[in-house]
Amino acid sequence: MPIPESIAANLSLPLIAAPMFLVSGPELVIACCRSGVVGSFPALNQRSSEGYEQWLQEINSALGEGDAPYAVNLIVHKTNPRLAADIALTVKYKVPIVITSLGAASEVVEAVHSYGGLVYHDVINTRFAKKALDAGVDGLIAVCAGAGGHAGTYNPFAFISELRELTDKTIIASGCISNGESVLAAQACGADFAYAGTRFIAAEESLANPGYKAMLVEKDAADIVYTPKISGVNANFLGSSIKAAGLDLAKMSTPEMDAEEELSGESKAWKDIWSAGQGVGAIKAVQPTAEIIGQFKQEYDGALDKLIAQRGQWRR
Ligand SMILES: Cc1cc2nc3c(=O)[nH]c(=O)nc-3n(C[C@H](O)[C@H](O)[C@H](O)COP(=O)(O)O)c2cc1C
């Protein structure tokens, strides 16, 4: 299904800057939306629901008619004690898009639909996708192999095709989309939207610390380690940050996932051990968000022109 007109109208590319724990805040969201890309943040990046409300007020008052809509990520899980309060605020401030993780609940979908918002749910396999569709979500985020954060293991060609067989709702491709060519590739393989996280960590407006940004500029896919040993769930991390923290994965066992500790921001995972996806090699500098998005647009247009020019080359 094409992106709904209410969302597409103010987009300059079919791109969502993905929500990232301890990385995305209002400055990044506002900069993305002003450049025609959906900006997003996890509600839990603020320590309290009051803080979440402040960010919603800040974003709502900064964005105007011509800007792209924004999204908020909610962790739908029993270990998230703020869920009910955060949903009430999401409804009060009419957040245009809600990205749900872990659980897809029909009550959340109903609450968001009550004011005309959309719910996209992230999935790593078709079992979770079917559950989310049963809960009535408006779209699925296909979190594929190589993605930053809790990545899946499927190749996008396979996974997006399987999701497309399940639904004609919006499909969003996630994992290693770090340039404009990859946004076009995501559309070509059946997705409606592309979802990019890693590339935006090194944006000037992100909350990531300067050492993290510098490491992203320096490293490429060879440094990315997929392991459950940091947080208890498989995720991609910069190997150099694991080493810098003095950890040796070979000597570590997999911890129980302690979602409460992780969500509280107290855990070493995410704060000192830095996550990134295999698309990290595209990051050549710390740049303003508008410049990153400008580059995406140029690459997208260039790739599209190249494909159209090549079209006549193939025997019919
Ligand atoms: C540092 C970091 C933190 C993340 N935190 C979250 C999060 O809190 N919630 C969420 O739904 N996804 C989170 N993700 C996953 C992203 O939303 C997205 O799926 C992923 O970054 C896309 O892959 P890419 O990094 O290769 O572009 C995180 C990713 C990174 C790199």
Image (tube, helix red, strand yellow):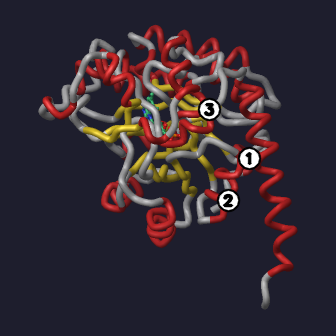
| Helix, strand or loop under label 1 | helix
- Which residue is more in the foreground, 112 or 272? 272
Residue at mark 2: 2
Answer whether labels 2 and 3 touch (C-beta < 8 Å).
no
Which mark lies nearer to you, 1 or 3?
3
Q: Secondary structure at mark 2?
A: loop
The mark that comes first in sequence, 1 or 3, is 1
Judging by the rendered image, the residue that carries numbered circle 3 is 283
Task: Name the residue furthest bottom.
Answer: 316
- Amino acid tagged 3: Ile
In front of the other: 152 or 250 = 250
Q: Quadrant of residue 93?
A: top right
Label for residue 33? none
In the rendered image, residue 111, in percent from the top left (x then y), is placed at 46, 37
Could you tell me the amino acid type at mark 1? Answer: Ala
Q: Nearer the viewer, residue 197 or 108?
A: 197
What mark, if any, has residue 8 been given in the picture? 1
